[in-house]
Each structure stands twice: as structure tokens, then as C-alpha cells.
Amino acid sequence: MIKAVIFDMYETLVTMFNSAYYKGKEISEDMGIPENTFREIWDPSVDDRTLGIRSFEDVITEIMNVNGIYDKELFDTIVRKRYTLTAEAFSHKDPDIIPMLKALKDRGIKVGLITNCYFEERDAIKACDLYEFFDAVCMSCETGIKKPDLRAYELCAGKLGVEQNECLFVGDGGSNELDAAKSAGMKPLQAAWYLKDGVDQPCGRLDLFDQADTPMNVIKFL
């Protein structure tokens, strides 16, 4: 019997692909340095930022200092744009996301979140209108554990007060999260409502898993 539904965040509850990007290409352009030069430090920092070891601000400061271009006004502009555009993604969600979450709560189903995220994404998540629906939240930058580490699933189920085999895990499939959910004893379900061809999303359709084409379809898999 399913007692809890645990969600991924990005490309599941919200999508980042309907809002303006502010990633390596755009940040390096604002800095006025070649993208490949920027990525020499930026790309290796991904794990540290995901696990909460370093912040966006830490890495931007290092890149600017190494390249001899540190300027407080430019730094502040880059940080502000990153946080603003990260939060802006939360205005681009399927209109049935909140009704689906309300339907789960009305049925007495607990709701959890497991997401690999940076500090700036954590702040956006805590400020968004979805946050009130979560009974347990496990964000990698706070826990120091990222998917597909099975400890993330164990931790979230524990916070929810349910057994792992009583959980439905819903995610787009990036980071091998669905395989990991299955290995953790949870019932995996691919969130397919944001998936689209021709977009550099983390994952496409995975035929090995059940799929929900709309948020409200999640209710059918309880």
C-alpha cells in the first residue's frame, strides 16, 4: 500500500526549459571571458556545489580572481541574475501540479522531495508555492547526499515515517533516479509531462518504467 509519494523537483514538479538560461555560456559572456576558460573551473565544481561543499558565489569569485577580472559590481550582477532566473523557473509549471499535490494530501498521502540542487536552487525551492506541500525534504546541498545514492531514498522515507516499499517515487529519470528508487524498494514512476523532443533535458522516455503523461495521472499509481 502506497503511503507516501516522493518527488524529484526539476523536470518533474517544475521545468527549467521554459525560462531563460543563466548557466556557463551566459555567465562567461557577462564576464567577458571565453566559455572554455570559464568551464575550466565551473565544470569541475558541479559535484561540490551539488553536495553543498561550495556555493555559486565561491566558484564565481574563484573564476574572476584566477582570470584577473574581479569586480564587485559585476560579481553582484552575476549573482543577482543567477538567483533571479533560478527562482523564475518556478513560474513555469504545469497547471495541474498544485491540484495533484492537493489531491494527494486530501487522500492522506504524505509528500516528500528528493532533489539534487545547489544552494541558489534550495533558496528558490524554499520560497516557492510548492514547499508547503512537502512533509519531508531532502536537498543534496543540505544533506550531502545526491541521487542515485540509495541513502537519499532511505533518508526521505525515514523522515516521512514510512517504509521504503510504501513509497511511490516520481521523477523524470535523470541521474538514474528511477533505477535507484527501484533498488531502494520504492515503486518508480516516470514523470513524462515535461518531456519534449529537441530539448537538452536530462532524460527522455524510459520504456522500462511506468509513465505518467499528466500530473493527475500520478493518482492512478497509488
Image (cartoon, helix red, strand yellow):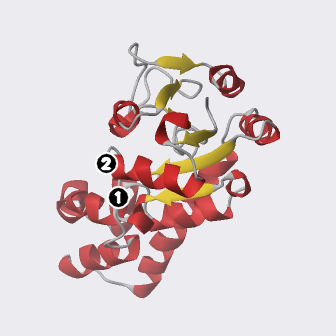
Question: Where on the picture, by quarter, is residue 15?
Answer: top right
Q: Could you tell whether 151 is left or right of 103 in the image?
A: left
Q: Residue at x 54, y 71 (%)?
A: 80
Cα gap from disc 2 to disc 1, whole angstroms: 7 Å
Circle 2: element type:
loop
Question: Where on the picture, by quarter, is residue 99?
Answer: top right
Q: Could you tell whether 190 is left or right of 222 in the image?
A: left
**Mark 1: which amino acid?**
Ile
Q: Residue at x 38, y 36 (%)?
A: 174
| Residue at the extreme bottom | 72
Q: Nearer the viewer, residue 82 or 174?
A: 174
Q: Nearer the viewer, residue 107 or 72?
A: 107
Q: Residue at x 44, y 68 (%)?
A: 142
- Percent position of residue 4, x then y: 62, 40
- Percent position of residue 52, x then y: 36, 69
- Percent position of residue 24, x then y: 34, 55
Tag 2–tag 1 contact (CB < 8 Å): yes
Q: Nearer the viewer, residue 12 or 167?
A: 167
Circle 1: element type:
loop
Q: Could you tell whether 93 is left or right of 73 in the image?
A: right
Q: Could you tell whether 121 is left or right of 35 in the image?
A: right
Mark 2: give few (<14), some (14-19) or many (20+) Cα within 10 Å. some
Q: Quadrant of the N terminus?
A: top right
**Mark 2: which amino acid?**
Asp
Q: Which residue is mark 2?
A: 149
Q: Which mark is residue 145?
A: 1
Question: Where on the picture, by quarter, is residue 83?
Answer: bottom right
